[in-house]
Image (spheres, rainbow, N blue to C red):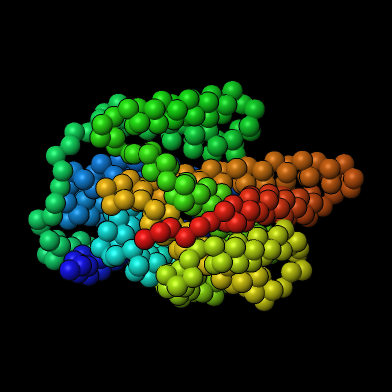
Amino acid sequence: MEKKPDYQLIAVLMSGAFIAFLSNTFLNVALPSIMKDFNVTTATVQWVTTGYMLVNGIVIPTTAFLMQRFTARQLFLTAMLLFLMGTIIAGFSPIFTVLIIGRMVQAAGAAIMMPLLMNIMMTSFPPRQRGTAMGIFTLVLFFAPAIGPTLSGFVVQYYSWHYLFYMIVPIILLVLIVAYVRLPKNTDTTSIKIDVLSIILSTIAFGGILYGFSAAGNKGWLQPGVILFIMIGFITLFYYVRRQLQLEKPMLNFRVYEYRMFMLASLIVGTLNMALFSGMMLMPIYLQNLRSFSPIDTGLLLLPGAIIMGLMSPISGKLFDMLGPRKLAVSGLLITTVTTFLFSRLSFETSYFNIIIIYSIRAFGMSLVMTPVMTNGLNSLPNRLMPHGSAMNSMLNQVSGAVGTALLITLMQNYTHTRLQELIGESGRENVEQLTNQATLDGINFSFVIATSIMFISFVLTSFLKRTAV
């Protein structure tokens, strides 16, 4: 007889995860306002997002160990307390550095929640129902962006962006109280020791890689410090992976990549995330800085696409249970790639309505990819590797998103600088502001071209998908 899923546990965990996902997305619309308040560049302000993902990339590799060593209740309460502390710090930040510190503390808590919830969803349901279960998980993942941009647009337009943090503190406290009272105290744990060297290697590896890519936005790719951090990161990553393969009980078991469908799913989701996260950064800059749309207009423009993603996630999960992954992923990535290319044709006359339509169709395509591909990959793993697969997926989402954002924002800035020099050379230094806007637009379009190329790689990889036997 199959064990009935613990719906009470799942509901509480989803509530916490929803708040974490909401916090990660609603700052996108506020980035131009933060740039003005703290007088920082585009490459610097991206640390609001990249710094968050950086800490996620460092903490998430430890979550497979944590899920075996501690109960779901202990982990969730710790995660929510960290998230509460970070929210308060960020909300009262008087300078940009304090805001980043707050976001990083937030991230330390959020990093635990996603793999914890994903692991419980995958182990609580039988394989034939996991597509539907993961669809519910991604509904939470995508419903937060559905209300995040509009909510933040309203707040930023009429109040300070600080209120984005103030308003979620009572909600976090409520979730904490409910979790403390309702979550079961006794669940199975394993007595394993933490490997300190693995944590050190993981921190240096992922920290070095992500910092190097992000620093390139301000300092350029050829600066010695940038190259040094990236090299140290990748060299340390090699030793980190080798150590995990040598340990009897690794903190993060890279043997999940011995399962071909899991490796293929990681490649598809990783490359797709690199391209997707950039759009979340570039679109508010285009709409507010170049087109002078208000923050609330920006939020409303992103709302239909986010709602589509939220509503489609359970449906695509159900379709995966019926049809398997390939048809959905191929169709979805074809739509996503074409619509991303259309964004590389933005101009100062592109209508608000056209942007909504393209963004919404792009969101529909994305909703057909994520749930089927991730579920098919995780289905290929035995239950003993499920915590490691969940942690690996969460880590990959954060690392690929951070690298993609840093890479494409850097390419945008470099192209903008080069293009501005060309325009000044052609037209002289009259109307420099107008020329700067044109160069920035060209830089954004160039970044979307690169994003389209990256997505095309994901599209090619989907042709190798096979349904995992369950």
Q: Nearer the viewer, residue 407 or 65?
A: 65
Residue 32 in picture, x, y percent from top left: 56, 56
Q: Residue at x 73, y 44 (%)?
A: 415
Q: Which quadrant of the rendered structure holds the N terminus?
A: bottom left
Residues 79 and 326: in front is 326
For the residue pair 33 and 178, the one nearer the viewer reads as 178
In this rendering, the count of numbered labels is 0
Q: Is residue 70 above or below residue 279?
A: above
With respect to residue 420, does 72 lie above or below?
A: below
Q: Please provide percent x and percent y for residue 122.
A: 31, 59
Residue positioned most to the front? 469
Going 49% across and 38% down the picture, which residue do you hit? 210
The answer to whether residue 275 is visible is no
Q: Is residue 213 left or right of residue 113?
A: right
Tell whether 209 sits left or right of 394: right
> Which corner quadrant of the image does residue 421 belong to?
top right
Q: Position of residue 403 (x, y in %)?
A: 53, 43
Q: Where does the C terminus fall, quadrant-wise?
A: bottom left
Residue 29 placement (x, y as % from top left): 52, 62
Above-or-below relation of 357 to 106: below
**Rendered residue at 32%/27% (across/down):** 246
On screen, residue 14 versus residue 450, left or right, reads: left
